[in-house]
């Protein structure tokens, strides 16, 4: 699903693209090929790749950039790497989880018990080619990103700032959603303490395109959604969270 000349959505449980457990997987045109933002759950990788080719015919997949290690975002990394030879780029703090296939840290064990994934579903270990740290500016396939660690949804949650078609954009993973909704969930490593430490990093970025891991996204005025989250967090009560009042799902 093409969003702009250089960007497409190729998997999403909300939009019925590829797998029924996939986060939003975005495809960004790089210098020589495509860069995926997140890898989906890995249950329907062939459908994801077909969608990618439909939006950008004959353009190879060169890299996958992971925002954090929850299964719906990282589960497809190993299969994508095996099928395409792409490189995997991930936060330094996510490396051990990805390379060991840690089902506890990734939340897979609990998610299987909750019936979200089949009983026999496993996280395939995947070598990480490039790791990034908070505040680092780095290049993937000729495209420059800035990494911002925004804990709260998980301890390894990262957002990535990048210019797309002349506009400053943010891939926010599950850290911040449309409308200023935050990503606290009932899981170890998730809570407001992380947001109190890190959310300020999203202030004053002048973001236009805001592309979260689920739900609505926007091609303009993305900063107002980040500012809404900042304003709510600065008050004495909890900000709106994912899952409240059937937000998102």
Image: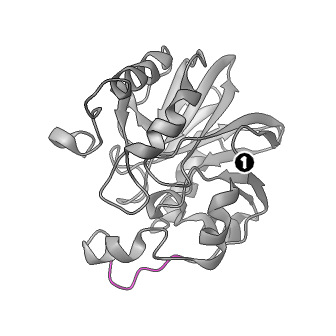
Location of mark 1 (residue): 133
In the foreground, 6 or 53: 6
In the foreground, 114 or 219: 114
Kindly identify the residue that appears in the image at 42 percent across and 68 percent down.
107
User: What span is colored magenta in the figure?
Assistant: 118-123
Kindly identify the residue that appears in the image at 23 percent across and 39 percent down.
247
| Residue 166 in view (yes/no) | yes
Taking 84 as reference, is 190 above or below it? Answer: above
Taking 177 as reference, is 109 above or below it? Answer: below
Q: Is residue 184 left or right of residue 245?
A: right
Where does residue 23 sit, x and y in percent of width and height? Answer: 43, 51
Name the dominant secondary structure of the magenta segment: loop
Taking 37 as reference, is 188 above or below it? Answer: below
Where does residue 29 sit, x and y in percent of width and height? Answer: 70, 37
Residue occupying the far bottom of the picture: 120
**Disc 1: CA contacts within 10 A as few (<14), some (14-19) or many (>=20):** some
In the foreground, 158 or 248: 158
């Amino acid at each position: 699903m093409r969003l702009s000349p250089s960007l497409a959505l190729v998997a999403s449980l909300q939009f019925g693209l590829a797998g029924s457990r996939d986060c939003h997987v975005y495809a960004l045109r790089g210098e020589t090929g495509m860069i995926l933002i997140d890898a989906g759950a890995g249950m329907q990788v062939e459908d994801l790749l077909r969608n990618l080719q439909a939006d950008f015919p004959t353009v190879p997949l060169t890299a996958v950039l992971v925002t954090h290690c929850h299964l719906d975002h990282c589960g497809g990394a190993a299969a994508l790497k095996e099928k395409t030879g792409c490189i995997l780029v991930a936060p330094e703090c996510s490396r051990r989880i990805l390379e060991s296939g840690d089902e506890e840290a990734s939340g897979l064990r609990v998610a299987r018990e909750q019936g979200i994934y089949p009983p026999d579903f496993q996280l395939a270990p995947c070598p990480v080619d490039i790791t990034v740290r908070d505040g680092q500016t780095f290049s993937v396939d000729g495209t420059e990103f800035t990494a911002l660690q925004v804990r709260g949804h998980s301890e390894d949650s990262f957002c990535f700032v990048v210019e797309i078609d002349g506009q400053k954009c943010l891939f926010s993973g599950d850290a911040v959603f449309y409308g200023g909704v935050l990503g606290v969930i009932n899981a170890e490593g998730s809570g407001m303490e992380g947001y109190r430490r890190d959310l300020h990093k999203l202030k004053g970025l002048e973001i236009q395109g805001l592309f979260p891991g689920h739900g609505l996204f926007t091609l303009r005025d993305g900063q107002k959604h980040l500012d809404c989250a900042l304003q709510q967090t600065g008050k004495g009560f909890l900000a709106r969270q994912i899952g409240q009042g059937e937000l998102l799902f």
